[in-house]
Amino acid sequence: MQVEPLGIAGALVVTPRQFPDDRGVFLESFRGDRLAEHLGHRPDIVQTNVSVSSRGTVRGIHFADVPPGQGKYVTVATGALVDYVVDIRVGSPTFGRSEAVTLDSRERRAVYLSEGLGHAFCALEDDTTAVYLCTATYNPSAEHGTHPLDPAVGLALPEGVTPLLSPKDDAAPTLAQAEADGLLPTWETCRAWAEQLAQRAN
């Protein structure tokens, strides 16, 4: 398993080693100890989410209040999607920047997003099944979003895809409006929370 940092602090891409034979394929899809080498703590997975999406479905940009936030380990069971990590942490050196990683059922890569980062994806195929391992349970009062088609964020959607958004995501504020409304986590708060998680691990 290869774990590499993305250009946004707290975001990792994981490429598993696959072992194919005439029966199929075997791989380790999650290793908390390997993630801990990069994060300073082992993610405490407490909830698993599954979403099935048609081609063009865009989910996000979603995030949760910090603390505790919600770290996410995202992979694909079937189909393919473009996964987006968005730095919404006010004061971060990469605030407003996004990184895109293609996840599919062939390479079987995964993305880890630390608490405080925004997350979105666009399904490339019908019946794309995404699996999320989460470090906090769903708390509707602490969940927020910004508009995935906000030009200031500029997510590069795949060519030929007509985006399909939920009414909730389509009504989400822009990044600038969310910042003005005080909805976004800060870089300082997220760093302090990461340090607390590392201290608990030790």
Image (cartoon, rainbow, N blue to C red):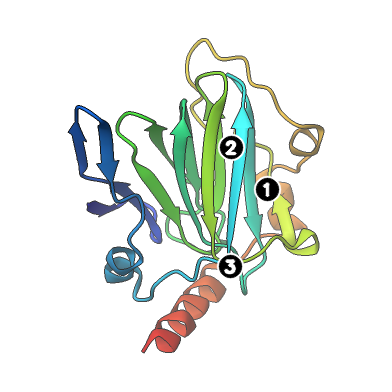
The reply to whether discs 3 and 2 touch (Cβ–Cβ < 8 Å) is no
**Circle on res. 186:** 3
Tell me which label, 3 or 1, sits earlier in the chain. Answer: 1
Of the numbered discs 2 and 1, the one sitting upstream in the chain is 2
Say the numbered circle drawn on residue 176.
1
Work out how far the residue at label 3 is from the one at label 1, CA to CA, in angstroms.
Answer: 14 Å
Rendered image: mark on residue 152: 2
Q: Residue reaching furthest top?
A: 160
Q: Amino acid at mark 1?
A: Ala
For image coordinates 35% across by 54% down, the residue present is: 12
72 relative to 169, above or below: below
Residue 63 in sight here: yes
For image coordinates 33% across by 48% down, the residue present is: 13
Between circles 3 and 2, the one closer to the viewer is 3
- Percent coordinates x, y for residue 192 in the rendering: 50, 80
What's the amino acid at mark 3? Thr
